[in-house]
Image (tube, rainbow, N blue to C red):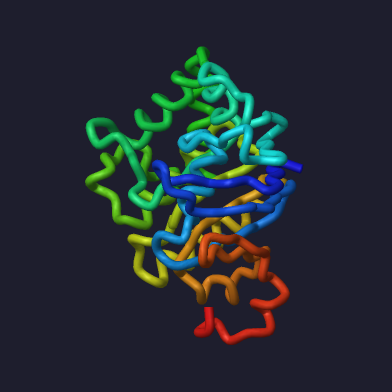
């Protein structure tokens, strides 16, 4: 199991936002987390890469990629994140350097040394996301969808076991959003799990997956229930 949460309490600042969280993710799974703004979707994702801490006294189990998040030390967090891909709604590209330099920066920061290995890996991930011709473009020269593809390429650099995506289509038009979710879904065929928060409910029909819903301070899996409901009821 890549992620295993049992009876975890999730806080935002000092406020309890999700109680008794039971959640898990395994290889190749495509998982949606849905819910209203402020329902805890982003906070849950942030616990997975240790942006938000989990109190050891308020979790029966909280493991990500074999690490116990109730005991993990700050110096161990970079190694955990290296095994993950993290995608943000606002892309978070470095705007003072081009696409190639953005990706090279990440590889060098995560321990890659040889120029030929770095160049080869960048070529591979850009090909994976259909952006091979954009390597020397600045982020400002790219559309929103292209920037998100580069953000996905960045997330793929270290061959992650899991990708955590926080509203990755939130700033995109419907057609571009569909293409981005299709790309993320396709990534799961390699065995990488994708956990994605979203407000884009129609995507759940186009690209079926496991569905969790955050509501009223709780999270529950509603995959089966969702498939029996009209999307407008969620």
Toward the top, the furthest residue is 113
Question: Which residue lies at the image location 57% right of the left edge and 45% below the top edge?
Answer: 163
Work out whether residue 187 or residue 120 is closer to the camera in this orientation and state it: 187
Residue ID at (40%, 63%): 37
14 vs 71, nearest the viewer: 14
Q: Work out whether 162 lies above or below 200.
A: above
Report the number of numbered marks: 0
The residue at 36%/46% (across/down) is: 91
Quarter of the view holding residue 32? bottom right
In the displayed structure, 204 sits above or below 86; it is below
Q: Is residue 234 above or below residue 141?
A: below
Residue 61: x and y in percent read 71, 39
Q: Is residue 14 left or right of residue 53?
A: left
Q: Position of residue 55 (x, y in %)?
A: 57, 35
Q: Quadrant of the N terminus?
A: top right
Looking at the picture, how far across and down is residue 226, in whole percent? Answer: 64, 77
Q: Quadrant of residue 161?
A: top right
Is 230 above or below relative to 220?
below
Residues 16 and 6: in front is: 16
Q: Is residue 190 visible?
A: no
**Residue visible at 56% across and 28% down?**
82
Foreground residue among 15 and 199: 15
User: Could one spot residue 12 in this view of the protein?
Assistant: yes
The location of residue 106, given as percent across then percent down, is: 44, 27
């Amino acid at each position: 199991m890549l992620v295993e949460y049992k009876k975890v309490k999730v806080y935002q600042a000092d406020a309890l936002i999700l109680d008794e969280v039971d959640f898990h993710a395994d290889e190749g799974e495509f998982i949606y987390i849905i819910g209203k703004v402020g329902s805890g979707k982003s906070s849950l994702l942030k616990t997975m890469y240790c942006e938000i801490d989990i109190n050891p006294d308020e979790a029966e189990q909280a493991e990500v990629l074999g690490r116990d998040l109730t005991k993990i030390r700050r110096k161990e967090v970079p190694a955990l994140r290296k095994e993950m891909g993290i995608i943000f709604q606002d892309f978070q590209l470095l705007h003072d350097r081009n696409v190639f330099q953005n990706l090279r920066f990440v590889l060098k920061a995560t321990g890659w040394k040889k120029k030929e290995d770095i160049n080869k890996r960048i070529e591979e991930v850009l090909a994976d996301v259909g952006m091979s011709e954009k390597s020397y473009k600045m982020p400002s020269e790219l559309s929103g969808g292209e920037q998100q593809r580069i953000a996905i390429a960045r997330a793929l650099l270290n061959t992650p076991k899991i990708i955590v995506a926080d509203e990755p289509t939130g700033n995109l038009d419907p057609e571009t959003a569909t293409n981005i979710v299709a790309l993320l879904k396709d990534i799961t065929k390699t065995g990488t799990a994708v956990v994605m928060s979203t407000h884009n409910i129609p995507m759940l029909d186009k690209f079926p997956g496991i569905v969790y819903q955050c509501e009223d301070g709780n999270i529950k899996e509603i995959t089966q229930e969702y498939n029996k409901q009209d999307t407008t009821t969620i």
